Image (spheres, rainbow, N blue to C red):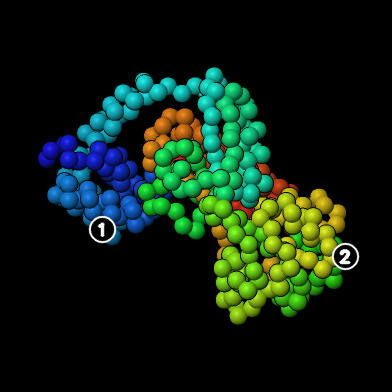
């Protein structure tokens, strides 16, 4: 085998596959999709001319060749890590690096305040530059001009690494004096006027129309599966707007639960569960393969996941203290690179 013809990144993927003995878990660990991980396993089998992992009643079982490779592989990767880590020693306390993060409005309202606080504690000289989805293209990310995107992605290049930060459900904000506050049925929901809020895609956005029901997002798609359609009176791209607009007694704002819960102390608003099923969504962070092994970038990813985990644990504590408050206790996988 000619090493010049082999993608050495395959060795890292093989190391994780042999450790996890599971394609899905290996993909989560590496921040790539399960189909991408399956394709990598096919490439590895071709390179080594061996199945490497075989399905059995106990899951995926390494072949004799794979078992022989594993300790040598681990030793080689550890040696390479020492070479690169010695050249790129990142010290958060003294670093003045600038991190450019594309964060959707949802992430800015829920995650970013806690992240900024953690950053000021862990690395007070680091500079954070937050960009909106309209400021950034996938090409910018591919070139490493933007460190990371934190968003609800519906479509993203397969080459990007990504990991789930958390999952969230939807809740409704209703004026306390509205008749719907005590009779929040599907019929009442459909007869009311609604505030639509979303901006998840990359690039410059365009105007919306109530006739676009099928393309308006999770909420309207969920209604569409029931053969229903809501009456949208106001379109906005900012999650802070509905809290103000919903103070009109004839309006309903259906929002991600973590955004809606920011209004728990607003005496004029109440939270209600939607009167129909809306699937949960995932907040993810994604980054270019160019930055995957960058030491400062790895530190940033770990800090983001740690911050998210702390917020989730705080939600769980509040839920135990006040069981009536909704909470989404879903812990994201750790980014173990």
Tag of residue 55? 1
- The quarter of the image holding the N terminus is top left
Q: Please state the horizontal and vertical placement of residue 288, each as a whole percent of the image.
A: 42, 42
Q: Residue at x 50, y 58 (%)?
A: 154
Q: Residue at x 59, y 46 (%)?
A: 132
* Res. 12 in view: yes
Which residue was labeled with disc 2?
177
Q: Residue at x 86, y 54 (%)?
A: 267
- The quarter of the image holding the C terminus is top left
Image position of 133 (left or right of 32): right
Residue closest to the far bottom: 227
Image position of 288 (left or right of 329): left
Q: Please state the horizontal and vertical placement of residue 83, each as a whole percent of the image.
A: 31, 23
Q: Please state the horizontal and vertical placement of residue 312, each as a whole percent of the image.
A: 62, 46
Q: Nearer the viewer, residue 68 or 104?
A: 104
* Res. 29 in view: no
Count of numbered tags: 2
Q: Nearer the viewer, residue 197 or 86?
A: 197
Q: Secondary structure at mark 2?
A: loop
Q: Quadrant of residue 116?
A: top right
Image position of 40 (left or right of 262): left
Tell whether label 1 touches label 2 (CB within 8 Å). no
Nearest to the eye among marks 2 and 1: give it.
Answer: 2
Mark closer to the chain start, 2 or 1: 1
Q: Secondary structure at mark 1?
A: strand
Residue closest to the far right: 177
């Amino acid at each position: 085998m000619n090493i010049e013809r082999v993608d050495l990144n395959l060795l890292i993927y093989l190391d994780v596959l042999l450790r996890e003995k599971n394609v899905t878990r290996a993909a989560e660990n590496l921040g790539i999709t399960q189909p991408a991980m399956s394709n990598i396993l096919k490439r590895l089998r071709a390179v080594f001319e061996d199945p490497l992992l075989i399905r059995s009643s106990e899951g995926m079982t390494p072949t004799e060749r794979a078992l022989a490779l594993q300790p040598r592989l681990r030793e080689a990767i550890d040696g390479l890590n020492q070479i690169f880590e010695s050249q790129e020693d990142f010290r958060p306390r003294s670093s003045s690096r600038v991190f450019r993060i594309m964060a959707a409005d949802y992430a800015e309202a829920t995650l970013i305040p806690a992240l900024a606080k953690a950053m000021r504690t862990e690395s007070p000289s680091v500079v954070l530059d937050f960009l909106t989805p309209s400021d950034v293209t996938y090409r910018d990310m591919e070139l490493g001009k933007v460190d990371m995107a934190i968003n609800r992605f519906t479509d993203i290049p397969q080459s990007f690494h990504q990991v789930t930060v958390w999952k969230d459900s939807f809740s409704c904000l209703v004026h306390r004096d509205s008749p719907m506050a005590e009779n929040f049925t599907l019929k009442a929901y459909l007869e009311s006027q609604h505030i639509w809020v979303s901006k998840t895609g990359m690039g410059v956005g365009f105007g919306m129309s109530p006739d676009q029901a099928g393309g308006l997002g999770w909420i309207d798609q969920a209604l569409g599966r029931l053969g229903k359609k809501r009456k949208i009176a106001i379109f906005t791209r900012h999650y802070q707007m509905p809290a103000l607009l919903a103070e009109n007694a004839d309006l309903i704002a259906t929002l991600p639960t973590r955004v809606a819960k920011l209004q728990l102390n607003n005496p004029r608003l109440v939270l209600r569960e939607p009167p129909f099923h809306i699937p949960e969504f995932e907040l993810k962070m994604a980054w270019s393969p160019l930055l995957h092994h960058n030491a400062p970038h790895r530190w940033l990813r770990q800090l983001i996941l740690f911050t998210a985990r702390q917020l989730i644990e705080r939600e769980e504590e509040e839920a135990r203290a006040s069981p009536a408050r909704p909470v989404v206790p879903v812990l994201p996988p750790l980014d173990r690179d």
